[in-house]
Image (tube, rainbow, N blue to C red):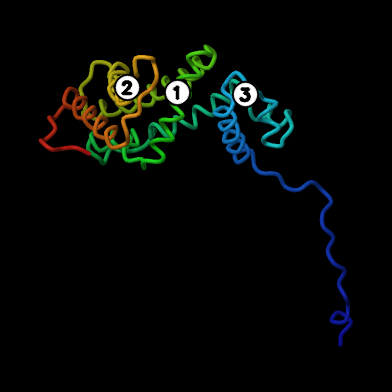
Amino acid sequence: MSQAEGEVRAPQRRSRGRPKTAPDSARRRDIVAQALQIFRELGYARMTTDTVAARCQISKTTLYRLFPSKTALMAAIIEAHTESMIDLPHDYDHLSLAEALDRIFFNEIDDEADRERFAFLQFLFLEAAVNPELKEISDKFGRHAVLGLLTDWIDHQRSLGRVDVPDSHDAASMLMDLVGGSIALTRDGRMQWPGSERRRAYVRECIRVFLGGVATRPMPAGDAP
C-alpha cells in the first residue's frame, strides 16, 4: 500500500463564519409577505416597523436597509398587489385588442385568487378611508401606477393604428372606470363582491363597449376574448 493510500485524511472543518444569507430580492419578498399579513391582522395604523422586523426575525437595521420607512414597505405591498391586477408591460400585439385586454386585466384568474384579490382591495379601501396617508400611498402605487401602464399600452396601440383616441391618458382612465365598476359600492360605502363569474362577464362587456368606441376597425359580431 502506498503512503498516499495509507494516509487518513483529517475531516474538513466547517467554516466558523456566518451562514450564507438569502439574497436581498428573496428577503424583500419575504418581508413584504409578512408585512401583508400584519397589515391584514392589525390594520395600517398598528402595523409598525418593529412588528415587521420581529415577525421576520431580522434587525431593524436590515429592514431599513431594504425598506427605508413604513411608507416604502406599504408601497411595496400595494405594488405586489397591483401586479395581480394588471399584466403590463407585456407584448400583446399578436392578439386581438379584446383578447389582449382580457389578459391585461387577468380576467381568467382562478376563483380563489380572484376572491383573495377582492378581499385585499376591500380591506385596503376601508383602511384608506380612515388613514389619509395610506390613501396617498394607495393612489400613487395603485391606481396611478395602473393608469400609467394602461396609458402606455393604449398609446402604443395608437401608434400601431389599432385604436383612435384623442388622448391616451383619458382613454385609459375611462377604461379603468368601466372595469372598476365590476365591484360596486353598497349604500354604506362598502365594496360588494359580485362573484367571479359575474365579474368576468362584466369586464368583458366593458371591453366590448370600450373597443366599440375606440377601435379603428369595428369588432366583428361575437369577437370576444
Q: Quadrant of residue 52?
A: top right
Residue neighbourhood size for the residue with mark 3, other residues' Cα within 10 Å, grouped as few (<14), some (14–19), many (≥20)? some
Mark earlier in primary sequence (3, 1): 3
**Which residue lies at the image location 68% right of the left edge and 30% below the top edge?**
63
Residue type of the residue flagged with mark 1: Gly
Closer-to-camera residue (85/149)? 85
The image quadrant that residue 181 belongs to is top left
* Amino acid found under the numbered disc labelled 3: Met
In the depicted view, which residue is nearer to us: 150 or 199? Answer: 199
Q: Nearer the viewer, mark 2 or mark 1?
A: 2
First in sequence: mark 2 vs mark 1: 1
How far apart, in angstroms, are the residues tagged by discs 2 and 1?
18 Å
- 48 with respect to 140 (left or right): right
Quarter of the image with the N terminus is: bottom right
Across and down, in percent, residue 208 comes to 19, 29
Where's residue 182, x and y in %?
Answer: 30, 26
Residue position marked by numbered label 3 in the rendering? 47
Q: Dots 2 and 3: beta carbons under 8 Å? A: no
Tell me whether circle 2 and circle 1 mark residues in contact (CB < 8 Å): no
Q: Which mark is residue 68?
A: none
Q: Is residue 7 above or below residue 59?
A: below
Would you say the residues marked 3 and 1 are in contact, meaning their CB atoms lie under 8 Å apart?
no
- Tell me the quarter of the picture where residue 193 sits: top left
**Which amino acid, mark 2?**
Ala
Instruction: Identify the element where label 1 is drawn.
Output: helix
Q: CA distance from mark 3 to mark 1?
A: 19 Å
Which numbered marker is on residue 142? 1
At mark 2, the secondary structure is strand
Which numbered dot is residue 184? 2
